[in-house]
Amino acid sequence: MYSSIATVCLSGSLEEKVDAIAQAGFEGLELFENDLTAFTGTPREAGELVRSRGLKLVTLQPFRDFEGLQGHARERAFDRAEHKFDLMEELGTDLLMTCSTVHPDSLPGLSRAADDFYELGERAARRNMRVAYEALAWGRHIHDYRDSWEVVRRAAHSSVGLVLDTFHIFSRQTELGTIGRIPGDRIFLVQTADAPRLSMDHLSWSRHYRCFPGQGELQMDSFMAMLQETRYDGPLSHEIFNDVFRMGHSDQTARDGLRSYHLLRSMQDDSGIPAPQPIESVAFLEIAVEPADLVPLRELLSALGMACVGRHHTLNAERWAAGDVNLVLNTEAGFTGRVPGRDATAITAIGLKVSNAYEAFKRADKLGYDIIEPEEVGASHRMSALRNVDGSLSYIIDDSQLSRTWDREFPVDVQPIPGGALVDIDHISVALSYHDYLSLMLQYRAIFQLEITPSFDVTDPRGLIQSQVLQNYNGRFRLALNASASPNTASNRFVRQYGGSGIHHVALRTESMRATSAALQQAGTQVLPIPGNYYRDLAARFDLPAQTKTWMQDHHILFDQDGSGEFHQLYAQQLAHQAFFFELVQRDGYQGLGAPNAFVRVTAQQRLEAETLAAHMDGNDLDTRHHNTDESAS
Ligand code: MG
Ligand code: MG
């Protein structure tokens, strides 16, 4: 098999698309006819453009509404095909991709269609060309690959073969077993696309929501296993119609496309790519701290029961810990992990613990991800990392490496790690542009073994935020990805204010919200105020003792419950230059991230921002909070 992608996947002109596809490292491309029609050169020049970049022109697509016609309409269909053959001759490609008809005058019947394809095969063969037949999920008569295969089988012509398109197969929930019985040499093209599971008509779902395998929810591994049965050896070609890809950066899309191709190949036994491992836990987070935030941040962490348990041997960096929570506060002015252009207290690296880091990097490398070695970032530690789409680093480490890193790098003023209520990092939430959302989704799901929850919407006062959670098997890794189409939602304001996507909040898990909230209150820590109406609603929704409700209201604690247990949440206010905020949670069997409370939190934060801005404007002190305000909305 070899890698290919349809030009329709990318944004830009044909030249831009071809460049992006070639630079990403694809071997072939499918030319979508609209891209040719809008091209200013001749078809011959389009073909030369593709070949000059070292790419094979796999097919011209699509040819529509061909089969099942009668009389003059049928003759016209063959004339149109001859016209396509002329174009293909000039382009220098031999394969015409034909989709099942949606023509209102077309007649049903597998044999009728097979006769049409036999004749088309004869005409194609005379010109050394081939025809491939695809069952569209919304085809008028043929919308099941088993029927398109039956047409191809009955046509029994060596120039007529089958197209398998994973979207069309999965969107109609067709069984996959028949695929394994199709001889590989009768399949001329395999088109790959994933998608979120949505309940809508097939056409709209296909035209707007397809995504690269690894970004959606379809069972691509089952398909690849069946495909292996056929011994198919042709192009594996992404065909993605996606609104975000159409808007996005072709280079980024094409690079992700090739990684997704490698991900598909890794699903077959002979790939030589190590299997994905689960992320075991978040080993640490590294925070670039603005000098003015250092003292209040230390105070906040102390109030949470954390302590400085070691200092770096050469850099201005401190390791703070409690239970399994580890935070590195780095105040080096030009420290290399820092995200370019993010002039704020921000999370610049995440440590992901796996059981075998070497194998995880080998997999990442084979999938086409760049690995950053410690020397490249001028670090004295020996941990390699991935560069995330937001500019931050993901260190991938295993147990022995982690202990050695702490011992070697933070040997000054070593203190024991405090026990107490704070036990772990519960979840991390990332605000992303839509394009980065899909990229980061692919990165995590391609490299690691993670589960994905269905996507849901958070109601922000200024629009909807789409959210989806990636999690591991034991609940010690939860990552929420958030993106929004509305310009002024919390996630998009983050993206704009801090020069791109990034970590938006970190939730630390406490075993006792009572102890943690009391400690915060005693230390005078500013928490996010929650309106009284929330607690009236809570009393109506849940059967809570009055005392418990009063305690929650006094400490601004949010609450939720699911079939598995209870969840308590509390938010610390952001420091003057802090891009992210801390959440505290107590999780007693509860599975989610408190999604039903998200709109209350988002609204409370926006109210607080507005009040803080107003207070500073009164005091002519605009500078100190400017990071936390939205210039365009003020
Ligand atoms: Mg297709
Ligand atoms: Mg949260």
Image (spheres, grey):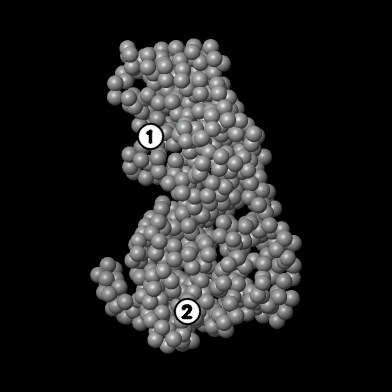
Q: Quadrant of residue 538?
A: bottom left
Q: Is residue 173 above or below residue 108?
A: below
Q: Which residue is depicted at the point 53% across and 64% down?
A: 499
Q: Give the structural element (helix, strand or loop) at label 2.
A: loop
Out of 144 and 45, give the one closest to the viewer. 45
Disc 1 marks which residue? 172
* Residue located at (38% from left, 59% from top): 486
Q: Amino acid at mark 1?
A: Arg
State the image coordinates of residue 428 (x, y, percent, origin top left).
50, 64
Tell me if mark 1 has few (under 14), some (14-19) or many (20+) residues whose alpha carbon lies within 10 angstroms of its own.
some
**Dot 2 crowding, Cα within 10 Å, few <14, some 14–19, many 20+:** some
Horizontal side of 420 relative to 104 (left or right) equals right
Q: Which residue is mark 2?
A: 625
**Quarter the C terminus occupies:** bottom left
**In the rendered image of this protein, does residue 39 appear above or below residue 509?**
above
526 left or right of 232 in image: left
In which image quadrant can residue 612 be found? bottom left
Q: Nearer the viewer, mark 1 or mark 2?
A: 2
* Mark 1 residue element: loop
Which quadrant is the N terminus positioned in?
A: top right
What's the CA distance linking mark 1 and mark 2? 53 Å
Do labels 1 and 2 touch, CB within 8 Å?
no
In the current view of this chain or complex, which residue is farthest to the left?
540
For image coordinates 39% across by 86% down, the residue present is 618
Give, as a three-letter code, the residue at label 2.
Arg
- Where in the figure is residue 153, as x and y percent of width and height? 46, 16
> Where in the figure is residue 343, as x and y percent of width and height?
57, 72
479 w.r.t. 61: above or below: below
**Residue drawn at x 60%, y 41% as measured from the top left:** 19
